Amino acid sequence: MNTFIEVYQQRQDVFYEKIWEHLQISIIALVIATLISVPLGLLLTRNKRVAEPIIGVTAIMQTIPSLAVLAFLIPFFGIGKTPAIIALTAYGLLPIIRNTYTGIKEVSPALKEAATGMGMSSFKRLSKVELPLAMPVIMAGIRTSMVLIVGTTTIAALIGAGGLGDLILLGLDRGGDINLILLGAIPAALLAIILDFILRLFERTSAKSGFRSLVSLLVIAALVAVGPLAFGGKAKNDLVIGGKIGSEPAILINMYKMLIEEETDLNVGLQPNLGKTDLVFSALQEGSIDIYPEFTGTALVSLLGQQAESNDPEEVYQQAKQGMAEEYNLAFLQPMQFNNTYAVATTQELAEQYNLETIGDLKPIENQITAGFTLEFKDRQDGYQGMKEVYNLNFGEVITMDPGLRQGAISSGEVDVIDAYATAGYMIDLNLKVLEDPKNLFPPYQGAPLMRQETLNKYPQLADVLNQLGGKITGDQMRQMNYEVSFEDRDPAKVAREYLVSEGLLEE
């Protein structure tokens, strides 16, 4: 408990900012979902033949995994709050539409006939009789939708929308840091409970005030969510630099930002923790970000679908650079020295027990051990699929997991071997044994700025600025910086600045 309080105190400013972001996204999505669903639900009560098909479509939309929806929206709307709000709105439609339709349908037929007998038109009967009586049911649907939206908003952090999901992702990246995860999860749950309580009050008053309670709710929600935007916003960025989940991308994008702002007049924004390779690359292609650090091996194998023609780092870089320019019109600047290649790692104890030195040494015990791989590594040719072909390995059990959970799994003995990154901080923390790759399954993975060619054409000075990092940062230096961020909880920006100052690239 004391540790949790310390984590809260250290991140107090960020904590309240994330709560506000979470609340803002959730409320905007709820308001839009309500404005769509209530009129649509009312319309369906007058066209009952199409009611079930439309309600069925909204039900199907709710079954689609939220991450898939977000990934689908990136090419059209980029990253950030816009695609997140669109996805959350889609998830919030069903409860409101269904309850609106049901609430109107369940109004007593006798009352409807009496209203008609008094000469009321269909619209007047709806506004004066049916809608006021159905409001408690409609408000119950809005309550259900809100709880659903608040819970799903955490996943929006994967596309740079912010919110409490940022803290949860950070906790996962830090090896399953339970305190950080709880710092994001508990407020999200409390937020849902508080908002549910507030909406319950509106639901109770709606029995008396009818449609006015819904109007009041929407006006208040809109003011809460959008009001602060009227008091100014952040300065517009000339460039946006994105990064995948993890300490290493966070450190590198801060280096890029500091160098660019030091040597140019450009204002740079950062979008860290944007998810895995496919999401970040989609954001670059779409134009939501201008630059992100990518690895030469990943660009070659995963993005271009090519095999390395050589295991020489320079030749791999040139092959990836040419491919990215020809196929995607992207510029790949000079790579840094460190090679954050994939590695297969195990504990020192298991390595000594079975005399493990190379990946091929796992063959005699392949049915006795459990492998813990990321989903991306399991499906990559320069990953487990390649291990099957090159080393003829087929483990008895393979468990897929989030990258941040691997170190916890091997530390607790749940898995015996993991895919690792050569410069990861947990290699130091857990003293893992890296198995040699004598058949060169894994190509070189040198980090380098990958950017839109149109951005480089607009700001050609960026090449000289960022190429200052070319050939710099050794594997030991990168591993140490990752360790400081992931296990000593240091700010990536401070770690980045210290390195740049030590290399004479920035003044103190």
Image: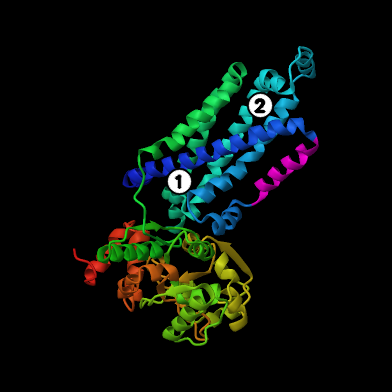
Q: What residue does disc 2 label? A: 137
Q: Residues within 10 Å of mark 2 (few under 14, many from 20)?
A: many
Residue 486's x, y, as percent? 38, 60
How far across and how far down the image is residue 456, in percent?
Answer: 39, 70
- Residue 297 visible (yes or no): yes
Residue in the picture at 60% in, 16% down: 208
Measure how far apart labels 2 and 1 are at the Cα level.
Answer: 30 Å
Q: Nearer the viewer, mark 2 or mark 1?
A: 2
Q: Is residue 43 a member of the stretch shown in magenta?
A: no
Instruction: Specify the amino acid type for callout 2.
Output: Val
Q: Quadrant of residue 54?
A: top right
Q: Are marks 2 and 1 in contact (CB under 8 Å)?
A: no
Q: Nearer the viewer, residue 463 or 254?
A: 463
Query: Where does the magenta region start and end?
Result: 49-64
* Residue 58 belongs to the span the image colors magenta: yes
Quadrant the N terminus occupies: top left
Question: Residue tagged by mark 1?
Answer: 164
Q: Earlier in the sequence, mark 2 or mark 1?
A: 2
Q: Is residue 357 visible?
A: no
